[in-house]
Image (cartoon, grey):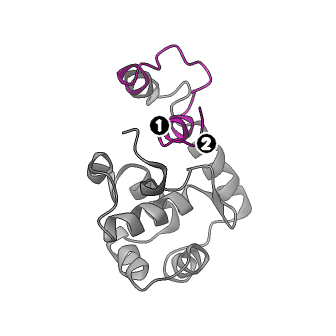
Amino acid sequence: MNTMQNDVPESGYKKTERLVYFARMCSKARLMARGLLPEDYHPYIGTGFDGRCCRFLGIRYEDFIKEVARGLTDDELLDWCYANGRRPNDEEVFIWNLFMEKRGWRDDDSEMLQRDKESLGLGDREEIQTLFDFYDFDEGRRK
C-alpha cells in the first residue's frame, strides 16, 4: 500500500467514544464514496475488520454505508449503530478493543502479517507486531 497520508483511513487505534477501529471503518467508507480510497483497500471494504465491526454492533454494512452517505459524523454514525443494532456493554467493549488491538500478534493472522511486512522489506521490524501497527506504518503514521 504505502499511500499518501491524505488518502488513507484513520488509524485503527483511534477511538470513537469507547471503540477502536470504528473511526477507521468510517473514514474508509468516506474515502471510498469520494473515489479516493486506494485500490489496495477495495477488496476489504465491508469485509474483514469492517464486517467484524458491523457484526459486533449488530448492523449491516450496506445500511451503514447509506448513513455515511448522509454525511453523519463518526459519533452520529455510532449513535445510529446503537439505535439500529446493539450497544455493547463495558465488558464487551473492553474485549473488542483488546482483541482488535492485538490482531496479528500470536494468532491466526500472524503469518499474514509477517508476509505483508516482508513484502515491504519490513520483515525484521519487531516493533510492528499487530495489524494496527502495520497499518500505521504503511500509511505513514509511524516510521
Q: Nearer the viewer, residue 101 or 135?
A: 135
State the residue at coordinates (57%, 27%). Answer: 128
Please check the rendered image and state whether residue 132 is part of the magenta-colored stretch, yes or no.
yes
The residue mark sitting in front, 2 or 1, is 1
Is residue 24 placed above or below 142 in the rendered structure? below
Q: In this view, does 102 lie to the left or right of 65?
A: right
What kind of residue is marked 2?
Answer: Glu
**Quadrant location of the N terminus?**
top left
Which image quadrant is residue 37 in? Answer: bottom left
Is residue 62 placed above or below 3 in the rendered structure? below
Q: Which of 93 and 18 is in front in this view?
A: 18
Disc number placed over residue 101 in the picture, else none: 2
What kind of residue is marked 1?
Answer: Asp
Residue closest to the far right? 90
State the residue at coordinates (41%, 69%). Answer: 30
Q: Mark 1: give few (<14), some (14-19) or many (20+) Cα within 10 Å.
A: many
Distance between the Cα atoms at labels 2 and 1? 16 Å
Is residue 84 placed above or below 28 in the rendered structure? below
Give the mark nearer the N terminus: 2 vs 1. Answer: 2
Q: Residue 50 placed where, x, y %?
A: 42, 57
Badge 2 element? helix
Badge 1 element? helix
What residue range appears in magenta? 116-143
Is residue 54 placed above or below 110 in the rendered structure? below
Q: Residue 59 placed where, x, y %?
A: 43, 72
| Residue picked out by circle 1 | 138
